[in-house]
Image: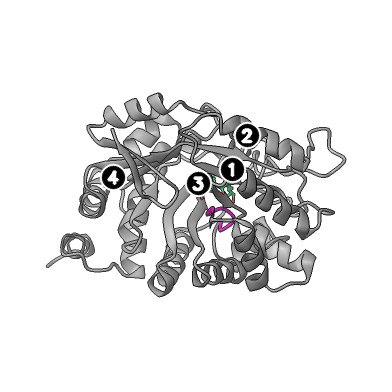
């Protein structure tokens, strides 16, 4: 008689969707090479030998944050010695400096939930950047920030997104999803968007023609069932809108967070297993990102054999994960990314933010 694992293998090889129970069974398996084998087959079917990356720059407008999530080492109160804010001129200066690199294609903008800034500040930042640097794609504001902007402005989520879109916002990063479970969110991050709100923002953005990414923060207080339910919520929404471009899983880094005494750093085993299972469950996502900042370059390289087909970008200058003790560099050159991909026998592809090919290398 076939075991559940035989059934899963047959289904994956025939391109048949896996169920919730099968997803949970995958997490109960410790046959890592088998998980990698199946995820790699799936990755190859959807993406061939290409591994995508882009040339981008992160800008975090402020670390002052009203949410103060337990898993975060970046956010702080306004009176903290570490707190900072960026004036619009400062943001412009950073962006212009970054754009001196003619390969730069994307600004990635994610910030704390500032207690006093009005929504207009964010609209102005986007408008100003788009006016000065019209060729740069603006991937800005997670669904959590959008929910917050709706609250502080009294506008609907749709109006907030529409206004930002008109000002020049092109797409949205995938952060803030954490685990889409009320139980987990109540415990870890009660002061920000609920699971339902996060999904509603993504749905509304997609309906307005704004594409976004999705993510999962794992390795803290969540169960395997909650990881699978999270992936299924994303898969269901993607069935409806097809608006997600990429999925990224963030392994929890406990250093400098209030959970540092209670929770250990994820194992490489769990990181590769979660990458593979994400690829297998998210059968309607073309791109799965191995975010080298979180994984480190050697593990991101391994992840390319466990379902990932994207390695993010040059990033400069990462702050959120490094506040939580990430050991990776804060930025990489294009050449290092290309070498890292080539060492795996795959073909590096420089992409733009919408996954159009810029150059096959
Ligand atoms: O939502 C915060 C995660 C996210 C920790 O869309 C942590 O391409 C682990 O949105 N340990 C924000 N993870 C970052 C983000 C992002 C980054 C890179 C690429 C993209 C993309 C989006 O960072 C948060 C949270 O899930 N995070 N603290 C931590 N201690």
Q: Return the residue at label 3.
A: 250
Q: Name which residue lies at 73% across and 42% down.
A: 63
Residue 111: image location, x then y, percent? 68, 47
Q: Is residue 259 above or below residue 127?
A: above
Q: Is residue 341 visible?
A: yes
On the rendered structure, is 270 left or right of 130? left
User: CB atoms at circles 4 and 2 under 8 Å apart?
Assistant: no
The residue most toward the right is 79
For the residue carrying disc 4, how many other residues have a C-alpha within 10 Å: few (<14), some (14-19), or many (20+)?
A: some
Q: In the figure, residue 240 lies in which quadrant?
A: bottom left
Q: Could you tell me which secondary element the residue under label 1 belongs to?
A: loop
Q: Return the residue at label 2.
A: 96
Q: CA distance from mark 1 to mark 3?
A: 30 Å
Q: CA distance from mark 3 to mark 4?
A: 19 Å
User: CB atoms at circles 4 and 1 under 8 Å apart?
Assistant: no
Bounds of the magenta segment: 172-177
Name the quarter where the C terminus is drawn. top left
Q: Name which residue lies at 73% across and 60% down.
A: 191
Residue 120: image location, x then y, percent? 77, 58
Q: Name which residue lies at 81% across and 57% down.
A: 118
Name the quarter where the N terminus is drawn. bottom left
Q: Return the residue at label 1.
A: 133
Residue 76: image location, x then y, percent? 77, 43
Q: Nearer the viewer, mark 2 or mark 3?
A: 2
Label at residue 32: 4
Asked if disc 3 is less than 8 Å from ligand 1, the answer is: yes
Which of 312/70 is in front? 312
For the residue carrying disc 1, how many other residues have a C-alpha within 10 Å: few (<14), some (14-19), or many (20+)?
A: some
User: CB atoms at circles 2 and 1 under 8 Å apart?
Assistant: yes
Q: Could you tell me which secondary element the residue under label 4 belongs to?
A: helix
Nearer-N-terminus badge (4/1)? 4
User: CB atoms at circles 3 and 4 under 8 Å apart?
Assistant: no
């Amino acid at each position: 008689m076939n075991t559940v694992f035989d059934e899963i293998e047959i289904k994956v090889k025939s391109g048949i969707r896996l169920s919730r129970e099968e997803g949970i069974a995958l997490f109960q398996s410790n046959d890592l090479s088998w998980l990698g084998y199946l995820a790699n087959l799936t990755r190859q079917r959807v993406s061939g030998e290409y591994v995508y990356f882009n040339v981008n720059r992160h800008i975090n407008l402020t670390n002052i944050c009203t949410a103060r999530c337990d898993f975060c080492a970046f956010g702080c109160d306004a009176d903290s010695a570490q707190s900072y804010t960026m004036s619009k001129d400062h943001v412009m200066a950073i962006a212009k400096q970054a754009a001196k690199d003619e390969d730069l294609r994307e600004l990635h903008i994610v910030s704390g939930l500032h207690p006093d800034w009005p929504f207009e500040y964010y609209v102005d930042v986007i408008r100003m950047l788009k006016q000065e640097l019209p060729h740069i794609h603006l991937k800005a504001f997670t669904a959590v920030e959008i929910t917050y902007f709706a609250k502080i402005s009294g506008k609907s989520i749709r109006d907030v997104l529409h206004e930002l879109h008109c000002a020049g916002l092109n797409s949205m990063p995938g952060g803030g999803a954490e685990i889409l479970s009320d139980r987990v969110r109540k415990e870890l991050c009660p002061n920000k968007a609920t699971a339902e709100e996060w999904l509603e923002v993504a749905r509304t953005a997609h309906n307005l023609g704004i594409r976004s990414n999705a993510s999962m923060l794992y390795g803290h207080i969540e169960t395997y069932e909650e990881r699978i339910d999270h992936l299924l919520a994303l898969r269901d929404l993607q069935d409806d809108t097809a608006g997600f471009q990429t999925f990224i899983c963030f392994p929890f880094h406990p250093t400098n967070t209030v959970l540092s005494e209670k929770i250990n750093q994820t194992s490489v085993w769990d990181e590769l297993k979660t990458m593979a299972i994400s690829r297998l469950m998210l059968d309607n996502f073309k791109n799965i990102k191995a975010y080298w900042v979180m994984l480190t370059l050697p593990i991101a390289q391994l992840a390319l054999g466990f379902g990932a087909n994207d390695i993010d970008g040059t990033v400069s200058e990462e702050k959120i994960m490094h506040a939580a003790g990430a050991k990776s560099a804060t930025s990489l050159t294009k050449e290092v990314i290309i070498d890292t991909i080539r060492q795996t026998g795959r073909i590096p592809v420089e992409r733009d933010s919408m996954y159009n090919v810029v150059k096959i290398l």
